[in-house]
C-alpha cells in the first residue's frame, strides 16, 4: 500500500461451494466448484462428458448452517464456516474451518487499515 498498490477492503467471503453457478473446469475436463481443488481428481464434482453430480455432501454445502456456533457468530458474514480447501488439507474433511481466533486477533487492525486507506465510509 505504501507503494500505491491497491487491495480489496474487508468484504463478506462466502465459499464458492455455497454459491450457485460457480465452477472451474480443468484442462482435463474435470469440474470443481472451487479453483483451489483443481487437479485433485477425488475432489471433482463432475466432468464435461457426464455433467455435474450432486455435490452437497461431498463439499458439505452450507456446512455453517449445521453449527449453532456459526449461526450465532458475529463473524458469520466474514467467514461462512471458513475455507473447505484449507480444512480438507488439514483434516481430510470439509467441515467448518473456524476463523474465530484469527478474526479476534486481526479484525481490528484490518478495519483500522481500511479506514486509513479510505476503503470504509466513516460517518461523522
Ligand atoms: S468464525 Fe467460526 S463460529 Fe464463526 S462463522 Fe466462522 S467457523 Fe463459524
Image (cartoon, helix red, strand yellow):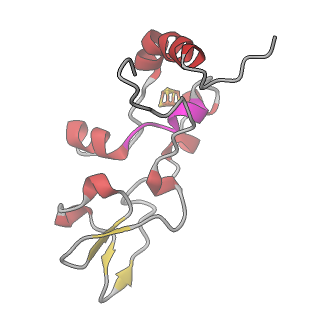
Q: Nearer the viewer, residue 69 or 98?
A: 98
Q: Is residue 41 left or right of residue 61?
A: left
One can see residue 61 in this view: no
- Up-down: is 41 above or below 72? below
Give the residue at x 21% y 41%: 89
Q: Is residue 28 left or right of residue 110?
A: left
How many callouts does the rendering have? 0
Examine the image and state in which quarter residue 33 appears: bottom left
Q: Which residues are magenta?
A: 76-83
State the quadrant of the N terminus. top left
Give the residue at x 44% y 32%: 7
- The x, y position of residue 105, in whole percent, is 43, 10
Give the residue at x 38% y 41%: 83
One can see residue 112 in this view: yes
Q: Nearer the viewer, residue 29 or 86?
A: 29
- Up-down: is 8 above or below 49? above
- The x, y position of residue 97, in whole percent, is 38, 34
- The x, y position of residue 48, in whole percent, is 31, 84
In reply to whether residue 94 is colored magenta, the answer given is: no
Q: Is residue 118 left or right of residue 91?
A: right
- Up-down: is 104 above or below 12? above
Q: Residue furthest right?
A: 124
Q: Residue furthest bottom?
A: 49
Q: Residue furthest front?
A: 3
State the quadrant of the C terminus. top right
Give the residue at x 22% y 36%: 90
- The x, y position of residue 85, in whole percent, is 30, 46
Examine the image and state in which quarter residue 84 appears: top left
Amino acid at each position: 500500500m505504501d507503494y500505491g498498490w491497491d487491495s480489496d477492503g474487508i468484504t463478506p467471503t462466502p465459499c464458492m461451494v455455497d454459491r450457485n453457478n460457480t465452477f472451474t473446469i480443468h484442462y482435463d475436463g474435470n469440474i470443481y466448484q472451487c479453483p483451489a481443488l483443481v487437479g485433485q481428481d477425488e475432489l471433482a464434482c463432475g466432468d464435461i462428458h457426464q455433467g455435474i453430480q450432486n455435490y452437497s455432501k461431498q463439499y458439505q454445502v452450507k456446512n455453517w448452517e449445521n453449527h449453532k456456533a456459526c449461526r450465532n457468530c458475529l463473524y458469520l458474514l466474514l467467514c461462512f464456516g471458513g475455507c473447505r480447501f484449507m480444512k480438507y488439507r488439514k483434516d481430510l474433511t470439509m467441515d467448518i474451518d473456524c476463523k474465530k481466533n484469527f478474526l479476534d486477533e486481526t479484525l481490528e487492525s484490518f478495519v483500522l487499515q481500511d479506514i486509513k486507506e479510505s476503503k470504509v465510509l466513516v460517518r461523522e
